[in-house]
Image (cartoon, rainbow, N blue to C red):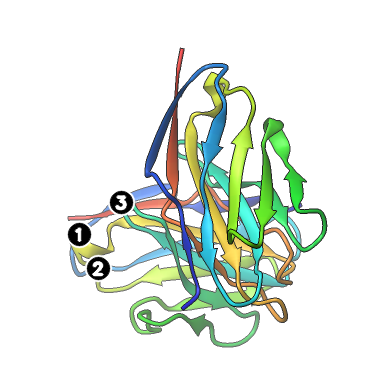
Amino acid sequence: AQSVTQLGSHVSVSEGALVLLRCNYSSSVPPYLFWYVQYPNQGLQLLLKYTSAATLVKGINGFEAEFKKSETSFHLTKPSAHMSDAAEYFCAVSFSRTGFQKLVFGTGTRLLVSP
Amino acid sequence: SAVISQKPSRDICQRGTSLTIQCQVDSQVTMMFWYRQQPGQSLTLIATANQGSEATYESGFVIDKFPISRPNLTFSTLTVSNMSPEDSSIYLCSGGAGASTDTQYFGPGTRLTVL
């Protein structure tokens, strides 16, 4: 069955530390992958996406993610956390490579950043 | 890109009543979607709102409970009918061009509490 898994409902880092948020998918065909961020009381905003071009994808706010087919992963990283990065992060997958897009979301990871 | 607004931003409703949520996009989009985000959980797709025709519902969601309209390419409504406390959630709409690689743009959500 096709699914997407985010390990860790909460991740805590100190300001300036590396951020690593994990996302794995289960699919026989490599899907298209997205990371969205949700700030409190706001909608989702796209951070970055993988669409079969470069496997290392750079996004907004200094985030990047690497698609690893052998590991079926698309982990999100940022070298140095900032207080403003505290939010909920969702990995989403479009398993359909043709036709209209339907996104399947992971359960989300709440990033906590301490001074 | 597209900017999406929703009305109301939040509401508290009584059991057995219905609430209609409006979603407005600032530009024409091919696809519009409605999601539910239950407390502490991820987003679940309710349906795809089709312009000028009946919405396409996901498994577990039915038209009688969640009637959807989409009279044009920039506007859609979702009605939550005969509400119960289990319907307490954040309801989000999104829109986009619709291809598998395209970005979906999200509204800020409507926070619904049913007493």
Q: Is residue B9 above or below residue B30?
A: above
**Amino acid residing under circle 1:** Gln
Q: CA distance from mark 3 to mark 2?
A: 16 Å
Neighbour class for label 1 at 10 Å: few (<14), some, many (≥20)? some
Per the rendering, the mark at residue B25 is: none
Counting from the top left corner in percent of width and height, residue B54 is at 54, 87
Location of residue B19 by image quarter:
bottom left
Residue marked by disc 1? B14
Q: Nearer the viewer, residue A41 or A58?
A: A58
Q: CA distance from mark 2 to mark 1?
A: 7 Å
The reply, left or right, for residue A56 in relation to residue B90 is right
- Which image quadrant for residue B66? bottom left
Q: Are marks 2 and 1 in contact (CB under 8 Å)?
A: yes
Report in which chain the residue with disc 2 lies: B
Q: Amino acid at mark 3?
A: Pro
Three-letter amino acid code at the position of disc 2: Met
Residues at marks 3 and 2 touching, judged by CB atoms closer than 8 Å: no
Q: Residue at (68%, 54%) from the top-left corner?
A: A67
Query: Is B64 drawn above or below residue A26 in the view shown?
Result: below
Q: Compared to B86, does A21 lie above or below?
A: above
Q: Which residue is mark 3?
A: B39
Residue at mark 2: B83
Question: On what subunit does the disc labeled 3 rest?
Answer: B
Which quadrant of the structure image shows residue B96?
bottom right
CB under 8 Å between discs 3 and 1? no
Front residue (pair A114, B85): A114
